[in-house]
Amino acid sequence: MDRLIRVIGVAAVVAGFAVWSLACKDDEPTTPAGGGISSTAFPGNAASLTAGAGATTGTLTGGTPPYMINTQPDGAVATAELSGTNNATLAITPIGVGATSVIIEDSSPVARESLTGQMVTINITVTDGGVTGLAGSGMLSVFSSVGNFSASGAFTPNAGSGQGVGGLRVNENGSDMLTVYAYSARSITDVDIVAVGFVYDGGTLMTGDYSFTPTGGMYGMYSMGFSIDPLNPSGAYLAISGTANLSSLTATSAEATFNGNGFYSPNPSQLFDFSKGMLTVTGFGSGNAFEKRIAEIARKMLREARERNSR
């Protein structure tokens, strides 16, 4: 079964602590190792990687170089690339949790007879590294008609107790996004969560007002939930109007106040309001390729929220 990715800190601010699956295929053809092809970084022709980490690179040896990729891995799980002299440098980048494989082919004489050379399959397994990118410490508090929230301290991924505040900044396709995520956990399946986001489409974040009515340009996003199971969220409160004022922003810190109103998803007729919100965060993380992929999915959900808001 597909594995649910714990990316609450980014996607929650857009669509209410949405948790989604990345397809995990395990149906790639298995090809016996041929010609003794192997890689220094993947002993036993197996790659065990962590989602969100950077590429692991190794040198291909054996067989008849140059090498080529016969079959790419499932792009939802990992990517593979050859470079360097004789295409002998193999880089595998983990994307999402799952299992897949890459098939490498050499240039042995059999290629001239059957259009394929000798091949080797490198099996790839990508496991959960927690919520990568989110980092820092701070405080966040807010009053609301459905319950008040307050948290402070350092962010801890997948915390089962205590409080924390962290941030993540992603610059993707010319747009800049900062998410501040706060939690108060009684257990790993019983967590109060608030997430506040600031987005500048086509520009760089700056201090100023960010409307919770998403119309493009500079806008804000807000979501909160109580007694949430992050792996099986049942719903969340989403803002559709109001303002977040980003009063201070540096490369590693931010301060803001916020207030507004919205509805409960999946029941839009259930309304709520929030006020006197304030946050500070220091030492937030910056997004890597994994967070950028998450941001793309988050933007898709944001478009759906815009459509709902315009009805």
Image (spheres, grey):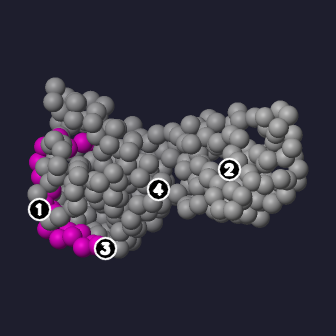
Q: Which residue type carries mark 3? A: Thr
Q: Residues within 10 Å of mark 3 (few under 14, many from 20)?
A: some
Q: Give the range drawn in magenta.
A: 236-257
Q: What element carries label 3?
A: loop
Q: Which of the labelled discs sits on residue 208, or is there none?
A: 1
Disc 4 to disc 3: CB gap under 8 Å: no
Which residue is label 4 attached to?
A: 289
Is residue 90 visible to us here? no
Q: Disc 4 or 1, which lies upstream in sequence? A: 1
Labels 4, 1: front one = 4
Q: Depth check: give the residue in front, 243 or 109.
A: 109
Q: Which residue type carries mark 4? A: Ala
Pinpoint residue 304: horizontal percent, then vertical percent: 28, 33
Disc 1 to disc 2: CB gap under 8 Å: no
Q: Is mark 1 on a helix, strand or loop?
A: strand
Q: In which quarter of the image is residue 109?
A: top right
Q: Depth check: give the residue in front, 219 or 108.
A: 108
Image quadrant containing the N terminus:
top right
Q: Which of the labelled discs sits on residue 252, or is there none?
A: 3
Which residue is label 2 attached to?
A: 125
Q: How far is disc 4 from disc 1 in space, using C-alphas?
A: 28 Å
Residue at left offset 59%, top offset 48%: 78
Q: Residues within 10 Å of mark 4 (few under 14, many from 20)?
A: some
| Residue 274 to residue 155: above or below | above
